[in-house]
Amino acid sequence: MDYQNISINPDFMPDVSVNIGNPSPAPAAAPAEVKQPEPPKQPSIYGEIPQIPTMDAVQGIKFDFNDGIRVLFPHNGKEYHVTFSDIDTGIILYSADTVPGAYVTSVKKFYIRFRLIIHEKGGTEPIFTHDFDCKDKEVMIQLPVGTLGDSIGWFSYVERFQQKHNCKLICVMTPWIADIVKKQYPDITFITTEETKNYQPYACYYMGLFFRGDVDHQPIDFRYIGLHRTAGYILGVDPADIPPRVDLSAPRKIKEKYVCIAAQSSSQAKYWNNPFGWMTVVNFLKENGYRVLCIDKEKIHGTGLNWNFIPYGAEDFTGDIPLQERIDLIKDADFFIGLSSGLSWLAWCCKVPVVMISGFTHPTNEFETPYRVINYHTCHSCWNDMRLDFDHFDFLWCPRHKGTDRHFECTKLISPEQVITTIKKIPTFHPAE
């Protein structure tokens, strides 16, 4: 089938896209003479949603709130006038006539309490009105696959949405992450991305960090408010810090006093790039009678000529093991030392003091900890700079100073002395007598 697009003046109706025919038309190809090389693309990190809206209105019209409000009009020869508004602000987001077969969807994809009104074209009385209400209905919230810190940071907002709306919440989550929370949340159904095709939800929302100023999938750019709190804004719930509940009931495994550390991450900007940092801190801890357990997934990680090794002197507890086993170990540590990375978020769930060493993020980007280590005398917080965009494909991303002697200075100039001073402030730190 051929598809005809209707062009909407963005100054007149900024919050809607309209297509005639199929809800998901294929994009038109650019003319050969102006076609540019495509940048690398990440694989899909979400599951599916139904192609056709799941709810019946009247006269064969269908609608739902999967990926914004969606309204599909039948090819029945009739023309309609469709209006939808934001109930909470009183703002009309779209109001226009349609043609047979039209598909209307909002540009904004985050949670909005929509009101849908449909008239027959030229009619004075609506033939259908619906206010968003997901009580007792299936709502799907999709978390990107394979991101430990993000999933942990966002998950408590999933429960808050379920409690606020009393809906049947379906959470799409990577199984190896879901395993640590699903027993604590019996009112939430956990599924994989492959299983999404088996559901016909009333509404669906996507958790994520949306880059390059995208305020269609998030109401506020995440760089303003932090990695985890952006989920609260996307879902319209309280954005306060609350760690997910995990099972902390396992008996203690190690009798001696010990500390868990995690030194590896997914991007070099997240590392503690002071060459003497970890070695000095590990020595300090061992001199004070601590066993220092490195619990990273990988002993060695990097790319090209740039590789990072387990800190010298730490005990090797690395490996790809179930997260529950990591929890069982972290929960009885006197404290945890890590980066702006997944295992620090896991330690947050374990209710142990977290020393977080990070310079490329602003402290508001992560959960609140009184043991945050950052050096404000250097370049810092590029991740939260609205003028900069993160490059997922550049392991050595340093947008301000890459290729200069200031490359990664934000953590090169976090001294081991600063970290040790922070450790000494932790009530559960027990120095050698």
Image (tube, rainbow, N blue to C red):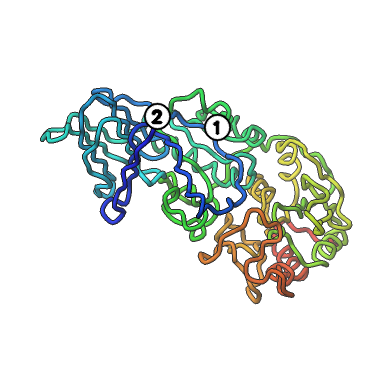
Seen at 83% across and 42% down, the residue is 254
Could you tell me residue 48's position as x and y percent?
Answer: 51, 32
- Callout 2 touching callout 1 (CB < 8 Å): no
Taking the image as drawn, is residue 257 in sight? no
Q: Which is nearer the eye, 140 or 23?
A: 23
For the view shown, which residue lies furthest in the bottom direction?
377
* Callout 2 secondary element: loop
Rendered view: 200 above or below 278 = above
Q: Which of marks 2 and 1 is nearer the N terminus?
A: 2
Query: Farthest left residue?
Result: 124
Image height of 391 relative to 299, above or below: below
Residue 348's x, y, as percent? 64, 49
Q: Quadrant of the N terminus?
A: top left
Disc 2 target residue: 1
Between the residue at mark 2 and the residue at mark 1, the CA separation in whole angstroms equals 45 Å
The amino acid type found where label 1 is placed reads Tyr
Q: Using residue 12 as the reference point, say whether residue 209 is left or right of it.
A: right
Tell me the quadrant of the picture where the C terminus can be found: bottom right
Q: Residues within 10 Å of mark 1 (few under 14, many from 20)?
A: few
Give above or below for 305 relative to 66: below
Residue pointed to by mark 1: 185
Residue 265 in view in this figure: yes
308 or 21, nearer to the observer: 21
Tell me which amino acid carries mark 2.
Answer: Met
Q: Mark 2 against mark 1, which lies toward the viewer? A: 2
Asked whether, in this view, residue 417 is left or right of residue 107, the answer is right
| Residue 120 figure quarter | top left
> Which element type, helix, strand or loop, lies under badge 1?
loop
